[in-house]
Image (cartoon, rainbow, N blue to C red):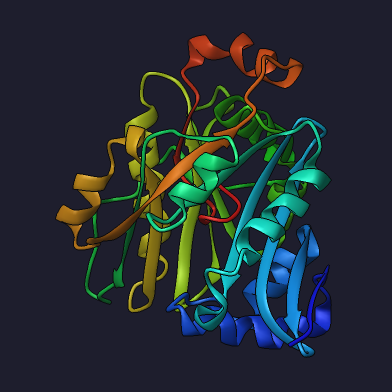
Amino acid sequence: MSKLLTALRADHLPEAVRQSSALGWPYREADWRFAFDLGSGFAAEVDGRLVATAMWWPYGKTHASVGMIIVDPRMQGQGLGRALMAKLLHEARNRTVVLNSTEEGLPLYAQLGFVARGRVFQHQALWPATTVLATEPASVRPMQEADSESVRRLDLAATGMDRTALLDALFEAGTTMVVDRGAGVSAYACAREFGRGVVIGPVAASGPNSAADARDLITALSDQVRGRFLRIDVTEGSGLSAWLTETGLPCVGHAVPMVRDVQPRAIDAVADAVADAHPRLFALSNQSFG
């Protein structure tokens, strides 16, 4: 049996879909392509057959996210996941690296220096065509081109990471809405085709009304996808998990956010400079990107 670690290639993606489907992950080939075009990764082959994947996405020069880490169940326990992670971390170099772990992955990531930071709650269901959460406030509107820089600054303040490339791809791929009470953008949310239907995220908001703004944006976007399968991954600190369950979008599982090599950085100082606005990330774009 010949094992080979190699760069993840576009021709791997159809087999990567089959690998993720075998684990119950709902990624379409379009989702793999979206991730592949934004980042890079590594693959493990055995006798020319794809058996494992791992990807990473740089967020500026100081941060990165890791995900799409899959090992064929028949090949687990042979160190492939650790070998792929070692290659990713080498590529990321001195960046602070974030990921969202399954319970099964926690021991490996802890051994690699990752520290758990709360939980992410996965909510999903077929969203009934008759469901209407609330009347859309006048302050909620579609994002305009002139809003894009304000949205990027808000995301930076909420996450501490320069996610410009990710945001630009999300703006192009789906629908983005903002909250604007006449003093500029105070919250934003994206929705796009993903997996079995539509995912809402990221959702970020600032100011004293941030939680209400996040709910208003989720309400507005979910109203546009009635009758579709809907998914939202919310942070533990968002306080939205119970509300989503009450509205008919149950929690079906959770992931554990983890961080490796956190250091004081200039990018974090930018976020701290606007901390008085209480910028918060309420929902992820997905569990791989954060």
Determine whether, in the image, residue 71 is placed left or right of residue 46.
left
Name the residue located 65 percent from the left edge and 46 percent from the top edge: 65
Q: Nearer the viewer, residue 200 or 115?
A: 115
Question: Does any portion of residue 137 appear in the rendered image?
Answer: no
**Residue 52 x/y as whole percent:** 65, 74
Name the residue located 36 percent from the left edge and 63 percent from the top edge: 223
Determine whether, in the image, residue 78 is placed left or right of residue 115.
right
Name the residue located 57 percent from the left edge and 82 percent from the top edge: 19
The residue at the far left in this view is 246
Above or below: residue 274 compared with residue 73? above
Name the residue located 58 percent from the left edge and 72 percent from the top edge: 71
Q: Quadrant of residue 15?
A: bottom right
**Residue 180 x/y as whole percent:** 51, 33
Above or below: residue 2 compared with residue 139? below
Q: Nearer the viewer, residue 62 or 141?
A: 62
Q: Nearer the viewer, residue 45 or 202?
A: 45
**Residue 53 x/y as whole percent:** 67, 69
Q: Quadrant of residue 163?
A: top right
Determine whether, in the image, residue 222 is placed left or right of residue 131.
right
**Residue 112 x/y as whole percent:** 60, 41
Q: How many numbered markers are drawn?
A: 0
Q: Nearer the viewer, residue 214 or 88?
A: 88
Question: Does any portion of residue 89 appear in the rendered image?
Answer: yes
The quadrant the N terminus occupies is bottom right
Q: Quadrant of residue 249?
A: bottom left
